[in-house]
Each structure stands twice: as structure tokens, then as C-alpha cells.
Amino acid sequence: MVFDRSARIAAVAQKEHEQIFPKPGWVEHDALEILRRTEEVIRDALEQRGLRAADLAAIGITNQRETTVLWERQTGKPVANAIVWQDTRVAEDVARFASQGGQDRFRPQTGLPVSTYFSSLKLRWLLENVPGARGKAAGGDLLFGNIDTFLLWNLTGGPRGGVHVTDVTNASRTQLLNLKTLDWDVELLAAFDIPRAVLPEVRSSSEVYGQATLSAIRGVPFAGILGDQQAALVGQACFHPGEVKNTYGTGCFLLMNTGERPVPSNFGLLTTVAYKLGNGAAHYALEGSVAITGALVQWLRDNLGIIEKSPDVEPLARTVNDNGGVYFVPAFSGLYAPYWKENARGVIAGLTRYANKGHLARAVLEATAFQTREVVEAMEKDSHIGLRSLKVDGGMVANELLMQFQADILNREVLRPVIQETTALGAAYAAGLAMKFFSGLEELRANWAVDRAWTPHLAEMDREQLFRQWKKAVTRSFDWMES
């Protein structure tokens, strides 16, 4: 996406890439395909408006966090497919690590529980299971990175001088970064048996990392990196402690800016880095991560064939007035916040002969709103801040039935901004700040405006009855997988 100084979209191009499911619980991406698609959409977006490299002030990168790539320094070739954040192949390692000190043994340093979610155990799995990988990594012949690092390295020269760097937000999701020092932690590297030689340098989210070598953008500085959810926080201009956004994508991610000190969670949330702009102090966030939301709509489309296109879920759900007593708990990869139960699995509860595909579609949408309420309640307990309204973004915010139900089940106003591509916008802001393209945070805050607001209409008795039934359904998903 190309943005102008007013944060308006000047050009946009997008392409899907393949989702690979080689075994139950395994989710992979072809990192080289992602690189090819990235190069293609760069060219397509520039061609739309007849733009050249000289027209660009800077480039920012935002990416799915945690997804783990390991590649050869000399060739740039990945040693295996990227292991995606949703992948659960390291579940046995999670159980073993948790048995030796508890699921929260690394929370004091990292803010994160032991989980299949983060990069640490995924990287360890690659080093253990790809022949020769551990020796090559220790010798400096392999490089690790999340997708931000893999793209930056390739687009700044690859084997011929590519920059091997990540930012603090992505690094904070590896479970190898110390939140206080903002550098790789020696004790964590030893615990996970990760050689430091494989890791990228950790930098701020807004500074010049290197120059592009791809012909379409040659010479343009890469000047911003933010993990996708932190990028949305910046794109929503949540720069003050207590400000919150929720992104509805493949999963759902609620982040609250907690200021310059990390706030530990006692209610199942994650403590993470929100952003670090240049030489400024790092800001931290509390995050509630829900694994499956938009991905559940895709599952309805691709696995069951109930809808042809993802947007079709809304008109199908509108064919019924309520969920018909049907609740869908999408614990395909276990449950994330606030439960962190690796052994939970998906459940559809409350089925009767009365239920039809409209009720199932409605239950799919309502699952997203119910999970968001659970995270909001946990966040209010951890932060001691009551949420007055919820800023929303991501692909699912176009679904007006979902947004109204979200307001109803939260009993709070839901606000959709004029610029809904806040994740890309946040990366653009980070890059623009580094190059003085934007004057500062107040200019960015002034760009934010409401497109649509939803107010709650549901009676309290009905709201609480629906939520009680949801909580009952969630308990039915627990402990499905036996260790």
C-alpha cells in the first residue's frame, strides 16, 4: 500500500499466498512465495499510479508475527517451509518445558507463557529436525527471522549484503527477547538451545535499516518495521496509556498501550512491546490474542463449502434472527487468551434438528465477539482501566452484523475508523517518522477519524444469558487432546 502525507491510500495491490497443512495441527507457508508475492504487489501498486522509486520517501514493513523462517546465508534458500504462528507441532515440547518450571516460567523476562504460539520452540524444532541445521546455525551459515526479517534481508541485497535485522515488536514475540534490556537474553537462548549466531540484530521500530535493491524501489530506505498488531495500534494512533484497539483478521488481537513500563498479566494476557520510535523510550502493551476468528469464516468457506466467498457469511447469518442455541468454539489450535489451553479443540455445541446453516454462520460470527469480550474483561482486570469504547480494524470490520453484535455483547460503543487498513498505515507511519515525512505523533493523531459507530441495543438479561452459554460451550472444548 502507498500512502500520502494525509494518510490517504494512493495505491494498493494485494495477492493471496498458499496456506499449507501437511499434517493435522501443522500450518506452513512457502517463504519464497511470500517474497515473490511481495515483489509483485510492489510493482503492481507503483504501476497503478505511474509511481517511481523517486516518488517514495520510505518503506515500512508489517508482518504476521511469530511465523518462523530459517534460511541459508549464502543462497537465501529456506531449509524448510516457514512454521506459522498457528502451528501446534511443538505441543509435546510445550508440555515438557512447562513440566520443568510451569507454563509461566519465562514470563518475568518475556511477558509470555510457554506455548506453541511463539517462535522459540518453532526455531528449536527446525534446528532439531532439519538434517545438519544445528551445526550450520552454530557456524553462522543459517539465518533466522520472522517474515519481516526475511523480506528485509532479501529486499536489501540478500546473499549480497542483505540487512539481517528485526525490530523490538517482532523480537518480543520470539520468547527470546528480554523485555527490560530489549536484547536477546542469554539465559533464554540456553534454555531453548538457540545459537546466538542465527539471530538478527534487534533495532527500534522507526529508523533507517538499509536501502532497497529491488529495481522498482531501488535506493528507497527501509525505515519502519512493526509486527502486524503493534502496527495497527500505531495506525489507530493509540499513543497514550489506556488506549485500546482490536484487529479482526485471521485471529483477533486486542492491544492496550500501557506506557513506558511493562505491565505483568495475572489474567491470561501477554505483556509485549508496543513500539519504539527511534531513540525514544520503548512503549509496552497488554495483548489478548485469539487464535481463530476470520480463519473460522475461511474454514466455513473452504472446508465445509457452506459459503462461496468470505463476505457471504453475513447475508447467510442474517437469514436467522439469533443463533438458535448454537455456539461454535473454534479451538482448532487450542485456546489462546485468556485460557492458554493447548489441548483444547474445536466444539460446536447446542445443536438440535432446528439448527440450520444460517444458525451456524451466525455462531461463527458470534464466536469472534464472545472471545473479544473475554479478552476485554481480562484486560480491564490487569490494567485497572475501564474500557469506554473499542477502536476496531481489520478485514472483518466490514461485517456490520458482527460489529453490532460486538457492541451488544460488550455493552460498549464500537468505533470503525475512516482508514481501516490501519496495519499497513502503522508501518507507513513508522517509516515516515524516521524520515521526518511526518512531523510527529500529534500529526498522526489528527489523521484519525470515525467512519461508523455502533451502540449497544441488547437487553442486559439477554446479553448475560448469551455469554453464560458461551462460557459453558468453552468448557466443553477443554482437555480434548490427551497428553
Image: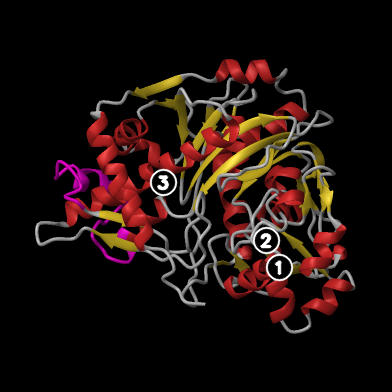
Q: Which residue is mark 2?
A: 119
Mark 3, Cα crowd under 10 Å, few <14 / some 14-19 / many 20+, is many
Mark 2, Cα crowd under 10 Å, few <14 / some 14-19 / many 20+, is many
Q: Which residue is mark 1?
A: 123
User: Which SS class for mark 3?
Assistant: helix
In the picture shown, does residue 241 fall above or below 352? above
**Badge 2 or badge 3: first in the primary sequence:** 2
Q: Marks 2 and 3, Cα distance to the nearest angstrom?
A: 24 Å
Residue occupying the point 23% across, 28% down:
459
User: Which SS class for mark 1?
Assistant: helix
Q: Which residue is mark 3?
A: 371
Q: Where's residue 30, x and y in %?
A: 58, 67
Q: Marks 1 and 3, Cα distance to the nearest angstrom?
A: 29 Å
Q: Where's residue 322, x and y in %?
A: 18, 43
Is residue 426 found left or right of 368 in the rendered image?
Answer: right
In the picture shown, does residue 199 fall above or below 271? below
Mark 1, Cα crowd under 10 Å, few <14 / some 14-19 / many 20+, is many
- What coloring was used for the rendering? secondary structure
Circle nearer the viewer, 2 or 3 = 3
Residue flagged by tag 2: what amino acid is it?
Answer: Ser
Q: CB under 8 Å between callouts 2 and 3?
A: no
Q: Nearer the viewer, residue 143 or 248?
A: 248
Q: Quadrant of residue 462?
A: top left
Is residue 464 found left or right of 413 in the rendered image?
Answer: left
